[in-house]
Amino acid sequence: MIADVSFVTEVRDLPAFRNLLIDYYRIVLKTFEAAGGPALLPEELAESSLEHLDEMLPPEGRLVLARGEGGQLLGCGTLRRIRPDAVEMKRMFVRPEAQGLGLGRRLFEMRIEEARNMGCRAIYADTAKGNRPMLSIYERFGFNYIPRYPENANPPEFEPYLVYLEYRFPQPLD
């Protein structure tokens, strides 16, 4: 079912990527609203993401896309550089029909390795309060809960509805 999972330097099919983002936001916004967050429109958030597509692509960002055997987009994940030595993980999504195949774990691990390759010492992330599946992944990989970090991509007024996390790469012993 999964044909390719790789980092891209451009998005060749913007309508397909827009639809993937809309599907992502439809799901994540349910959890966000359940945490008390305001109702937002998935289509508007997808358009806003596309307006900042350059932040998801090299040289400063990274976008990993998963495609099925027929070329359809099954999932994605991004990294956005927020400091010379740190990135923010965003937009991890696996379509329901591709869940249970280990794709989410693969997207997560690939982004951690890529952050290391980018020379990062830390990875930051956020998710909606109550998003147990994502929180479980972050916890499994050793992320720690922290207060809101200054470079967080979400508006400060969303703070009551979000959880913030940080992962620090182990430093080599000299």
Image (cartoon, rainbow, N blue to C red):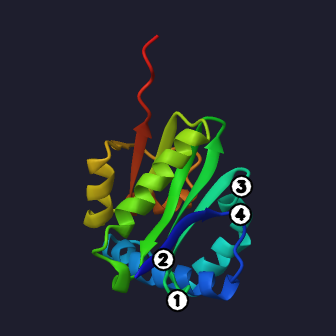
In this rendering, is residue 44 above or below 9?
below
- Of the numbered discs in the image, which one, if any, rests on residue 58? 3
Q: Which residue is mark 2?
A: 3
Label 2 CA crowd tier, 10 Å (few <14, some 14–19, many 20+): few
Residue 130 appears in the picture as rendered: no
Asked if the residue at tag 4 contacts the one at tag 2, i.e. Cβ–Cβ closer than 8 Å, the answer is no
First in residue order: circle 1 vs circle 2: 2
Asked if the residue at tag 1 contacts the one at tag 3, i.e. Cβ–Cβ closer than 8 Å, the answer is no
Mark 2–mark 3 Cα distance, whole angstroms, equals 23 Å
First in residue order: circle 2 vs circle 4: 2
First in residue order: circle 4 vs circle 3: 4
Label 4 CA crowd tier, 10 Å (few <14, some 14–19, many 20+): some
- SS class, disc 2: strand
Mark 3–mark 1 Cα distance, whole angstroms, equals 26 Å
**Image quarter (top left, top right, bottom left or bottom right) of the N terminus:** bottom left
Pick the residue in front: 128 or 110.
110
Q: Amino acid at mark 3?
A: Pro
